[in-house]
Image (cartoon, rainbow, N blue to C red):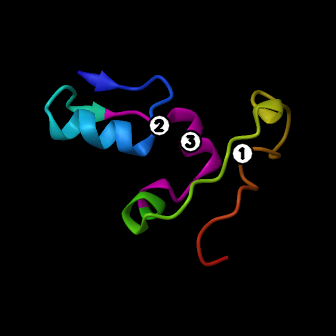
Amino acid sequence: MIGNEKLTLPQAEELLLYGRVDAISFGKAYIANPDLVERVAAGVELNQVEMKTIYAEGAIGYTDYPVLNQ
């Protein structure tokens, strides 16, 4: 089973820890955090997704989010 639906990191960790899901999906969080794996591993705050840019034309909101060590 895959967990999604706007989970926070602590919620996702709890679901995995107690075996309620096999995997977690972070769709919008991944768009805003191209370095999502590194951020989660480092315990760094995530960028917030700019909803007004979802499905917008061009690269704004897709390739311009800041990454760690930038």
Instruction: Mark 2 and mark 1 in contact? Answer it, CB < 8 Å.
Output: no
Mark 1 surroundings: few (<14), some (14-19) or many (≥20) residues within 10 A: some
* Left or right: where 43 falls relative to 12: right
**Is residue 43 toward the left or the right of residue 65 in the image?**
left
Spot the residue most to the bottom: 69
**First in sequence: mark 2 or mark 1?**
2
Which of the two residues, 7 or 57, is positioned nearer the viewer here?
A: 7
Which structural element holds mark 2? loop
- The residue labelled by disc 3 is 29
- At a point 86% along the width and 33% down the height, the residue shown is 57
Number of the label disc, if any, that sits on residue 26: 2
Residue 4 against residue 39 in the figure, above or below: above
Magenta-drawn segment: 24-37
Spatial separation of the CA atoms under disc 3 and disc 1? 11 Å
Q: SS class of the residue under badge 3?
A: helix
Q: Which image quadrant is residue 55 in?
A: top right
Q: Position of residue 54 (x, y in %)?
A: 75, 30
Q: Are marks 2 and 3 in contact (CB under 8 Å)?
A: yes
Q: Residue 8: x percent and y percent?
A: 46, 39
Q: Earlier in the sequence, mark 3 or mark 1?
A: 3
- Residue identified by numbered label 1: 62
- Amino acid marked by disc 1: Tyr
Q: For the residues marked 2 and 1, what is the alpha-carbon distance in whole angstroms?
A: 15 Å
Camera-near label (3 vs 1) is 3
Q: Residue at x 64, y 47 (%)?
A: 32
| Vertical position of residue 2 compared to residue 40: above or below | above
Q: Quadrant of the N terminus?
A: top left
Which one is nearer the viewer's eye here, 14 or 21?
A: 14
Label 3 CA crowd tier, 10 Å (few <14, some 14–19, many 20+)? some
Whether the magenta-drawn stretch holds residue 25 is answered as yes
Which marked residue is nearer to the observer: mark 2 or mark 1? 2
